[in-house]
Image (cartoon, grey):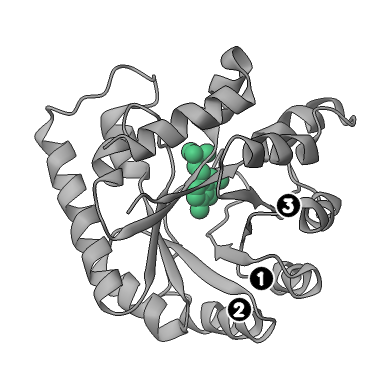
Amino acid sequence: MTARLNVNIDHVATLREARKTIEPSVLEAARICENAGAHGITVHIRGDRRHIQDHDIEELKQTVTTYLNVEMAATDEMVAIAERIKPDAVSLVPEGPNEITTEGGLDVIGNFDSVKNAVDKLKAAGIHVSIFIDPDIDQIDAAKRSGANQVEICTAEYAELTVGSQAASPRFSDPAVSAELSRIAAAAEHAKSIGLIVAAGHGLTTSNVAPLARMPEIEEFNIGHHIISRAVFVGLENAVKEMLESVRNI
Ligand code: PXP
């Protein structure tokens, strides 16, 4: 089974917010991604609103025809936004004010009560709940106990080992890469075995996604930065198609 691809279009809004203007349009980006074959659209509404704004989520809810997944922190403010707008899915993520991007999975064990409270409210609103999590069995068990429907395995460590922050060629020969792939595979197998849907994301590119796409437990990828970066040179439609090919071509 080929995994679904949700395209994270945050960086279309990053570019718009750089000028506080109306272009490029997040809605147009979503439409192009869907027409290119993306299975869903993912956006992250951050506490500091550095890219996606509240009105973007409202408008995306009206226009996305595939699947709208909104990443957010498990705070009362964010949960209230989700309860009001009701996207198809919410992915709970950790959030630090000074981080450049999400830095790792949510510590569900350490924040169990607040996470469970958010999961309960979101599920009561009819929203599918995913938790972004490191490939750690204990955290996955805690996600299951919280009542989440899905976990998204954080692939940041794998991305750093393969592509790296300098976007050099993938270093697949590094034994640390096989070790990290085994850790992700074990986490995915465990999550599926206890009834969770399994997704993966963070730092994935057309160069490093294949070993993950071969893992049958992973049903969904959330990929943003690489697709939007490629779009600068080849256009968004082609960039989405390239990634769909890479996810399929295993
Ligand atoms: N999944 C989650 C939970 C994320 O927070 C992010 C980054 O916003 C992504 C996937 C996408 O990561 P990238 O932009 O590196 O593809």
Q: Left or right of 62: which side holds 128?
A: left
Percent of width and height locating residue 87: 70, 65
Label for residue 75?
A: 1
Q: Which residue is mark 3?
A: 64
Percent of width and height locating residue 164: 34, 27
Amino acid type, callout 3: Val
Q: Residue at x 21, y 25 (%)?
A: 171
Above or below 81: residue 22: above
Amino acid type, callout 2: Ala
Looking at the image, is mark 3 or mark 1 nearer the viewer? Answer: 3
Q: Say whether disc 3 or disc 1 marks the residue closer to the N-terminus.
A: 3
Label for residue 118?
A: 2
Q: Left or right of 211: which side holds 59?
A: right
Amino acid type, callout 1: Thr
Judge the density around disc 2: few (<14), some (14-19), many (≥20) Cα neighbours within 10 Å.
many
Residue farthest along the top direction in this orientation:
233
Residue at disc 2, secondary structure: helix
Judge the density around disc 1: few (<14), some (14-19), many (≥20) Cα neighbours within 10 Å.
some
Label 2 near label 3: C-beta < 8 Å?
Answer: no
The image quadrant of residue 27 is: top right
Q: Residue at x 28, y 79 (%)?
A: 194
Looking at the image, is mark 2 or mark 1 nearer the viewer? Answer: 2
Q: Is residue 102 visible?
A: no
Label 1 near label 2: C-beta < 8 Å?
Answer: yes
Above or below 210: residue 143: below
* Viewer-closest of 165 and 198: 198
Above or below 71: residue 52: above
Measured in 3D between alpha carbons, the distance from the residue under mark 2 to the one under mark 1, in whole angstroms, is 7 Å
Measured in 3D between alpha carbons, the distance from the residue under mark 3 to the one under mark 2, in whole angstroms, is 24 Å
